[in-house]
Amino acid sequence: MFGPFKKKEPPQEPPKRFPPIPAWRPAITQSIDQIIDRLSFYTNGQRDIAALAHGTCVLLPDGLSDTDAEKFACDVLSKIFNYHPDMNPIPMKDGNVLVQYNHPAVNLVLGSVAAEHWAEIDNNHQRALATDEVLTTPLGSNVFDDFGKKALFGRCFMFMDAQDSRVIRIVRRVV
């Protein structure tokens, strides 16, 4: 039938994207030099590090060539992104937040950057959850304290790097 008697189709939900990603892609940038400096300090200079464009860093096994290091870093991000991006955030003594995953990749939220952009982080942290993601905290499901908000902010960069994996620097351990 036509006109007012035409059967209406139920509204269509947008297709689910897999793997799920957050809606928030922060425009905030952090200094790769500062991130590498802090990670080198945290590892006592004993690890090779591959840094990606948005600040995600992959801790490399010893002895990889630059080409193999880039491949390893991209493979690690793919494993995190395509399976489950479990995170383990750790407060560091210097005020930074280190976000670890179940593979050797990390994101570092610099305390100074978080303080400078706190309003944006606070306002967007719920958009940092992946589609349909539920994280249980002591405060409840998807309820976050300031530390949790910083961790979600940091994890956004892993998602951004995983979708466009570009190693921009390889830093070798101190001999």
Image (cartoon, rainbow, N blue to C red):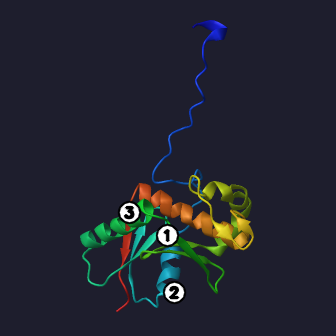
Look at the numbered disc 1 and give the secondary structure of its residue.
helix
> Which residue is tagged 2?
42
Q: Nearer the viewer, residue 82 or 116?
A: 82
Q: Which mark is residue 78?
A: 3
Q: CA distance from mark 1 to mark 2?
A: 15 Å
Q: Residue at x 54, y 71 (%)?
A: 87
> Which residue is tagged 1?
32
Label located before the other in sequence (1 or 2): 1
Q: Amino acid at mark 3?
A: Ser
Q: CA distance from mark 2 to mark 3?
A: 24 Å
Asked whether disc 1 touches disc 2, contact meaning CB atoms under 8 Å apart, the reply is: no
Q: Amino acid at mark 2?
A: Tyr
| Residue 154 in which image quadrant | bottom right
> Quick one: label 3, few (<14), some, or many (20+) residues within 10 Å?
some
Look at the numbered disc 3 and give the secondary structure of its residue.
helix
- Whole-percent x, y for residue 153 in the image: 61, 64
| Residue 57 in which image quadrant | bottom left
Q: Amino acid at mark 1?
A: Ile
